[in-house]
């Protein structure tokens, strides 16, 4: 996916385009909300933080053309907002991975295959839920949100090799749980 500002309609001459901003919001809000929820573990504050990220983007819309990769910029901004929130509200709660995941699309199939698919999805979700927190976050960012290894490394202040190692651990643990 092309995440440059020009690809979504923001250019040096059209930085104030409300339609381009709405497109950015529609494209990234759910992903940023899930990312924030994974960090702060509360729905209300996660939604507020995600909206605050977009509010700050709107306020800085005249200087957005200096951003090379909008997606990484949004995630880093969301991470910083979340960390600021956590500093001021120090009461973390456990995360419910099932509340984050969308229900899989179901096609008409016989009851047996639906049951098998449901049980398999429950097993996968349970295996993901048992991953260590950093490993789970890296897995979600790469596999569910589609970020690149280098973007996740930059976002979490890790090396690319660490991200690769954590993803390998996550996949290995999920595979073991499914056996």
Image (tube, helix red, strand yellow):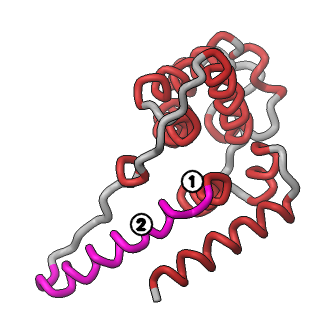
The residues tagged by marks 1 and 2 sit, at their Cα atoms, a distance apart of 19 Å
Q: Secondary structure at mark 2?
A: helix
Q: Position of residue 70 (x, y in %)?
A: 71, 36
Disc 2: CA contacts within 10 A as few (<14), some (14-19) or many (>=20): some
Nearest the camera: 3 or 153? 153
Task: Tell me if residue 33 comes above or below residue 119 in the rendering.
Answer: above
Q: Quadrant of residue 66?
A: top right
68, above or below 177, in the image: above
> Which range of residues does the magenta coloring cover?
109-132
Q: Residue at x 41, y 48 (%)?
A: 96
Mark number, residue 145: 1
Residue 117, x across and y down, in percent: 28, 78
Q: Quadrant of the N terminus?
A: bottom right
- SS assignment at label 1: loop
Residue at horizontal 26 percent and vertical 73 percent from the top: 118
Residue 126, numbered circle: 2
Q: Does the magenta run of residues contain 148?
A: no
Tell me if 102 is positioned left or right of 155 in this view: left
User: Which SS type dominates the magenta stretch?
Assistant: helix
* Residue 126 falls left or right of residue 9: left
Residue at figure coordinates x 78%, y 67% from the top left: 164
Magenta stretch encompasses residue 119: yes
Whole-percent x, y for residue 100 in the image: 41, 48
Tell me the crowding category of disc 1: few under 14, some 14 to 19, or many 20 or more residues within 10 angstroms, Cα based: some
The circle drawn on residue 79 is none
Residue shown at 62% from the left, 79% from the top? 172
Please, which residue is most extreme toward the left here?
111
Using residue 165 as the reference point, say whether residue 109 is left or right of it: left
């Amino acid at each position: 996916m092309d995440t440059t500002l020009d690809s979504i309609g923001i250019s040096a001459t059209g930085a104030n385009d409300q339609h381009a901003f709405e497109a950015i919001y529609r494209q990234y809000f759910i992903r940023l909300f899930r990312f924030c929820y994974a960090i702060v573990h509360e729905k209300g504050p996660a939604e507020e933080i995600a909206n605050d990220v977009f509010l700050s983007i709107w306020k800085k819309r005249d200087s957005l053309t200096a951003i090379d990769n909008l997606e990484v910029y949004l995630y880093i901004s969301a991470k910083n907002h979340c960390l600021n929130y956590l500093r001021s509200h120090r009461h973390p709660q456990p995360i419910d991975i099932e509340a984050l995941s969308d229900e899989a699309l179901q096609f008409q199939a016989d009851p047996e295959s639906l049951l098998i698919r449901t049980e398999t999805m429950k097993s996968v979700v349970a295996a993901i839920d048992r991953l260590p927190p950093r490993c789970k976050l890296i897995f979600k960012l790469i596999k569910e949100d589609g970020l690149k290894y280098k973007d996740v490394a930059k976002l979490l202040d890790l090396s690319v090799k660490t991200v690769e190692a954590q993803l390998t651990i996550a996949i290995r643990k999920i595979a073991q749980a499914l056996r």
